[in-house]
Image (cartoon, rainbow, N blue to C red):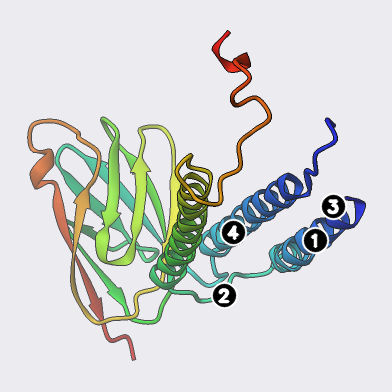
């Protein structure tokens, strides 16, 4: 467990720190000549990619979960409550 | 913990936290970049009023309903309003900023393509709002 938490802390830091450094490196000196259209649309497309990937993973997991654990799945195993009448109470 | 393994829940939490952190940091970074005005940006005072736009350049030149700028020169708009709230918008350059009476809002942009581009009001401001338009002329400054 600690390993997993540690792993994700490291991953978060790897992602966050470089971005924060870039942001603060900007400081008070003059800004660059940028095309705001390019920056804004690129940000939009990156965010859309993340949104669609997350959507696909979450809905895919749900679909798999429902398919795998349906009662009629040949691989389904009865729970310890089935047939005991405990669930009817 | 009721004895079952919950490593997958921690993986889920970790992925969500990492993604949210990345999305936030990335958006913040781009926002800073877009708002960072270059030092030599020319200031143009933009005033909205029912129902037209007026522009005043650094050299005192005034224009109404049309704005002439040079390609490759960064411009900083100082936007205000004389009556109600308007919103200064150049759709082709993703420039959008509210014009509020008694307040000066700023936004900057870099013209890169020569041509004519529409300017419009993006905040409903009364009867002729639909026609509160202008034209941006980007000319070769070389």
Asked if one can make out residue B88 in the rendered structure from this viewpoint, the answer is yes
Looking at the image, is mark 3 or mark 2 earlier in the sequence?
A: 3
Tell me whether marks 1 and 2 sit on the same chain.
yes
Label disc, if present, on residue A5 of the rendered structure = 3
Secondary element at tag 3: helix
Label disc, if present, on residue B32 of the rendered structure = 4
Asked if one can make out residue B75 in the rendered structure from this viewpoint, the answer is no
Please state the chain letter of the residue tagged with numbered disc 4 in the rendered image: B
- Whether tag 3 and tag 2 are in contact, CB under 8 A, the answer is no
B51 relative to A19 in the view: left or right: left
Q: Nearer the viewer, mark 1 or mark 4?
A: 1
Tell me whether marks 1 and 3 sit on the same chain.
yes
Secondary element at tag 1: helix
Label disc, if present, on residue A32 of the rendered structure = 2
Question: Which residue appears at 8% of the width and 46% of the height?
Answer: B131
| B72 vs A64: above or below | below
Secondary element at tag 4: helix
Q: Quadrant of the C terminus of chain B?
A: bottom left
Name the residue at the right extreme. A2
């Amino acid at each position: 467990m600690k390993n997993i938490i540690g792993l994700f802390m490291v991953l978060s830091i790897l992602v966050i720190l470089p971005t924060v450094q870039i942001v603060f490196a900007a400081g008070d000196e003059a800004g660059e000549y940028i095309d705001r259209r390019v920056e804004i649309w690129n940000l939009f497309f990156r965010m859309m990619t993340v949104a669609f990937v997350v959507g696909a993973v979450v809905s895919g997991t749900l679909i798999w979960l429902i398919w795998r654990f349906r009662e009629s799945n040949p691989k389904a195993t009865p729970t310890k409550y089935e047939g005991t009448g405990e669930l009817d109470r | 913990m009721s004895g079952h393994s919950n490593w997958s829940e921690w993986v889920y939490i970790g992925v969500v936290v990492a993604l949210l952190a990345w999305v936030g940091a990335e958006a913040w970074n781009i926002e800073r970049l877009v708002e960072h005005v270059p030092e030599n940006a020319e200031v143009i005072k933009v005033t909205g009023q029912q129902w037209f736009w007026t522009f005043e350049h650094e050299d005192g030149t005034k224009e109404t309903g049309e704005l002439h700028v040079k390609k490759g020169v960064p411009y900083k708009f100082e936007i205000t309003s004389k009556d109600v709230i308007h919103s200064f918008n150049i759709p082709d350059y993703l420039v959008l900023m509210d014009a509020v009476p008694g307040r000066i809002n700023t936004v900057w942009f870099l013209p890169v393509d020569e041509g004519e581009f529409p300017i419009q009001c993006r905040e409903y401001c009364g009867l002729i709002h639909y026609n509160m338009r202008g034209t941006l002329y980007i000319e070769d400054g070389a």
